[in-house]
Amino acid sequence: MTTTYKDLATQISSKLKNFRHEIPDTMQGFNAMAAATHTDGALSKKTKELMAMAIGIATRCQGCLAFHAQACVKLGVTRAEFEEMIQVAVYMGGGPSLMTAAEALLAFEEFGGEQAAA
């Protein structure tokens, strides 16, 4: 990785802002889907965010690591919860997910997850 996860989130956010003008219908649809997903329901927002991070790890999506790590921290995910999510992601994604899981933990710590303890 050549940049920090905070920088990556900022850089991607800038491009997404451009997309709002360049492909507004797509962005409106995506934003509506995100808003509908990120509410408490049968599953809590926190659980859904951990699921999103696990999928980001399994698919090796660097931008996903940045955005979902930041969201996990804001939602108060503990290190223990984050590490259990990592177990599931590695179980489902194998060795490549293990490497990405280490990066996800770096992102979680960079955003101050549980005050970057450990």
Image (cartoon, grey):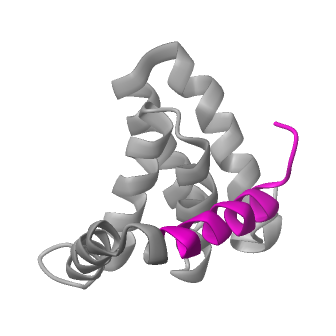
Quick one: quadrant of the C terminus?
bottom right
- The residue lying at 50 percent from left, 38 percent from top is 57
Residue 52 position, x and y percent, is 38, 55
Quick one: quadrant of the N terminus?
top right
Above or below: residue 79 compared with residue 97:
below
Q: Is residue 77 visible?
A: no
- The residue lying at 61 percent from left, 74 percent from top is 73
Residue 9 position, x and y percent, is 68, 64
Lateral position of residue 116 relative to residue 87, left or right: right
Residue 72 position, x and y percent, is 54, 69
Q: Residue furthest front?
A: 22
- Magenta span has 25? no
Above or below: residue 18 compared with residue 85:
below
- Magenta span has 13? yes
Asked where in the image residue 30 lies, by quadrant, the reply is: bottom left
- Give the extent of the magenta segment: 1-19
Q: Is residue 21 visible?
A: yes
In-front residue for pair 116/2: 2
- The residue lying at 40 percent from left, 65 percent from top is 49
Above or below: residue 65 compared with residue 48:
above
Asked where in the image residue 45 lies, by quadrant, the reply is: bottom left
Q: Residue furthest left?
A: 42
User: Total of numbered circles in the picture?
Assistant: 0
In-front residue for pair 34/20: 20
- The residue lying at 64 percent from left, 61 percent from top is 12
Q: Residue furthest top?
A: 95
Residue 55 position, x and y percent, is 38, 43
In-front residue for pair 92/78: 92
Asked where in the image residue 108 lies, by quadrant, the reply is: bottom right
Query: Predominant secondary structure in magenta?
Result: helix
